[in-house]
Image: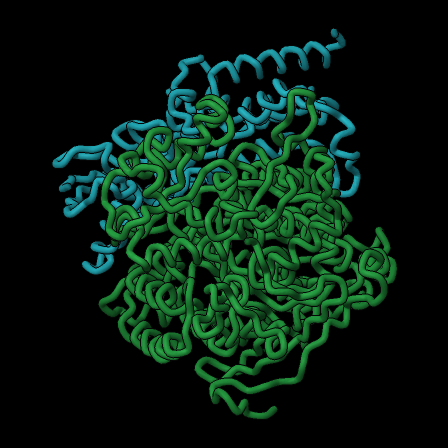
Chain colours: A green, B cyan
Amino acid sequence: MTVSPEYTDYTIGEPLTDSAAPAGPIHERWDKRRFEAKLVNPANRRKHTVIVVGTGLAGGSAGATLAEQGYHVVQFCYQDSPRRAHSIAAQGGINAAKNYRNDGDSVHRLFYDTVKGGDFRARESNVHRLAQISVEIIDQCVAQGVPFAREYGGLLDTRSFGGVQVSRTFYARGQTGQQLLLGAYQALSRQIAAGNVEMHPRTEMLDLIVVDGRARGIVARDLITGRIDTYFADAVVLASGGYGNVFYLSTNAMNSNATAVWRAHRRGAYFANPCFTQIHPTCIPRTGDHQSKLTLMSESLRNDGRIWVPRAKGDDRPPNRIPEDERDYYLERIYPSFGNLVPRDIASRAAKNVCDEGRGVGPGGQGVYLDFADAIERMGRKAVEAKYGNLFDMYQRITDEDPYEVPMRIYPAVHYTMGGLWVDYDLQTTVPGLFAIGEANFSDHGANRLGASALMQGLADGYFVLPATINDYLARHPHQEPVTTGHPAVQEVLAETEDRLNLLLAVDGDRTPDSFHRELGELMWEFCGMARTDAGLRKALERIPQIREEFWRRIKVPGTGEEFNQSLEKANRIVDYLELAELMCLDALHRAESCGGHFREESQTPDGEAARRDDEFAYAAAWEFTGTGSAPALHREDLVFEYVHPTQRSYA
Amino acid sequence: MKLTLRVWRQKNAGAEGAMSTYEVDGISPDMSFLEMLDVLNERLILAGEEPVAFDHDCREGICGACSLVINGDAHGPERTTTCQLHMRSFRDGDTIDVEPWRASAFPVIKDLVVDRSAFDRIIQAGGYVTAPTGSAPEAHATPVPKADADFAFEHAECIGCGACVAACPNGAAMLFTSAKVNHLNVLPQGAPERETRVLDMVAQMDAEGFGGCTLAGECATACPKGIPLVSITSMNKEWLRATRKAAGGR
């Protein structure tokens, strides 16, 4: 290891290569890998236990499918039921290269759009496989009874989504995530009833157990009794979602958290591209300091809604009083060919820019209009209601404004994290036997995820990719020594976990967990949000260790560890946010280029668009943990583009 | 706004519970009901008291976790989930009662948190289509009439919150069960298991200790997703049909 000449706060480790990806023509790689992967004899599968953490689209589909294959699955979720995982809140839809519209779509086009949309920071092999599998996902979900929207002829309806020019998004009104999740949940329920899945709801993973270099289990806490237990397996799958809640305010569920991935990172799994976070352009603006979370309005609204702000600064007339020629439909003006359907990162930044210019609307000038007046005129109110009714209702409930009469106000909010645990083509992390799927990994979306692609990736990983690749690992390690609680490595993890919780309870300070979470979130939003600078990130990196120090001095957690204690749950998650946030800022600082959702003000084109620096940064940054507050090591995985030639993205 | 809250406090499943009174001040009408409880909890923590435990997660009305009986109504005065209820639905100076779901099949875990795992077991009994991964035919192989697809969707919208049970004078779970039966039974994909599904799910529902249905209709009034009362009638038809068929009729 050598010390980086530019920054002293990290070291450069060995370059990383994805040894699982086969060579050859890209459209043959997945078939080739599936053929070369070793299989486990069906009769032997029940002898293998696989732990799955999380029951969202990725975890639910993986647990069900592994159990169908004959494995013994032990599964966990912090919610009271696997049906409540946050995938349920995804609204818009799921992409698939079915080309039912005959509009020129194909696997290759979905692959191309996704690599380009990700601003050339994703691995080609993975993205191509995702596009190939997309068509099977729709078949699978329809077979489960997922009630997708249909045409009068009884065939499936589709719509278009940001960043693409074909209509490949399948949807179930504004509740696509809910319907797909219930499909996976029902498949999982069937396996629970059959005794193939041992389900532990209201149980949260607190650490990973690594024995002789392999992932062999987890430490988890029963949230009702507070009991901390160990669970052992032949492989561990993390499907615990993203880490957007580092920002405090996000569209994530209140209890979505980063503990599973961060604890795995501390045990040896590299964390890739932590600074790649997605700020979604169409969320309901915050109304005050009491705000506990932000609510997304589906991106599908941009299909028919038109985004605008007043031309003049400080124009505070009601929107209906502002004449057409005094409005600036800025996305249509700047990006005439994609208009309101530019990718999310571009739409978000454009909204920030007009608000920074003083042309924002609503309280504090932190909002832009999303106007359906033209759509209602063109399609009629009934058609708009049929397409977006539930979203309009939700908007009205939250804001007390009627979007059929007054344009919606929207503002960007943290929504998704493209970064995550580094995985190879098999979705295996750098800890053998530890796999990461769905939003928990970093693999498919590069620096920006396209709309309707999260559901696609979660289900691709869970239904099709992991069940094929985990076979290979289990077949190669058929007779692992049983692990018991008495093993020194297990005792160590258990003791660390108990100590951490006991310390949280013992401090008895004068600040609530939420107050620290809010402080950290505000810092991250300011310095590691939509626009980032060298100076700002350095400021954040200086401040985070101070907050962490203060946290351990002043935190107040009431109650005990041996009971249902939501304050303790929260405080323990913040412990991990306070470390992860630092790595996010460091990653953002080291990547002195703009790409996708990562916009460095120092690196932009004359028009203010993100300027990538492929000569220096065409790699995935995989970070190795070396200790809290100690300089992490950066391992670079160079990205090779054989099929999609990197260009400056243009949506003009 | 200044409000008086009377909140159900119960240490754990085995403990006796009681209503406790709290004053909260500085509440904005734009706050959600849960954000108002956040304000209370922050204050309780700093005062060295235990915060009020309640289930919540997405806070956008779709995960089905939140579950409060507010002034005697499941999810409160508006037809929505508790997390989507805003303080503008109340008046300054109001006294508000906050209780957990009350039903013998939903035992209290702590304060306002109840155990709804009975719902999971009803789904496990048959609320699925047997379609193991990899076995699916091409999606367009079986067209589904739009009316059937819409009917299925309307019932599939159920978020499993349990408001129907909490609102029912008998503590019945008919609306929850019928929503899933109707969603799957109307679709061609659900047809092969049509009879076993309804029989097994209803049997499980009864075994969980939910009450009987007297068509009081409170469930459909409380349902934040608008699952209609006729859903129960449709399930009863399905159940009768399946029972006759099992007995050798047609």
Left or right relative to B240: residue A221: left
Image quarter in which the N terminus of chain A is found: bottom right
Tell me if residue A225 comes above or below residue A508 in the rendering. above
Q: Is residue A33 above or below residue B10?
A: below
Q: Nearer the viewer, residue A218 or A250?
A: A250
Q: Is residue A546 left or right of residue A83?
A: left
Number of numbered markers: 0
Which residue sits at x=58%, y=20%? B151
Observer-nearest of A537 and B228? A537
Q: Residue at x 82, y 56 (%)?
A: A27
Question: Residue A498: x percent and y percent?
Answer: 45, 69
Q: Residue furthest top?
A: B249
Q: Is residue A492 above or below residue A173?
A: below
| Residue nearer the viewer, A564 or A451 | A451
| Residue B132, horizontal then vertical, whole percent | 75, 40
Is A25 placed left or right of A545 in the picture? right
Q: Residue at x 54, y 52 (%)?
A: A343
Q: Nearer the viewer, residue A140 or B204?
A: A140
| Residue ranking furthest to the front | A325
Is residue A63 visible from the viewing direction of this image?
yes
Residue A500 in view of the camera: no
Q: Position of residue B206 (x, y in %)?
A: 54, 24
In the image, residue A257 lies at what x, y percent?
47, 59
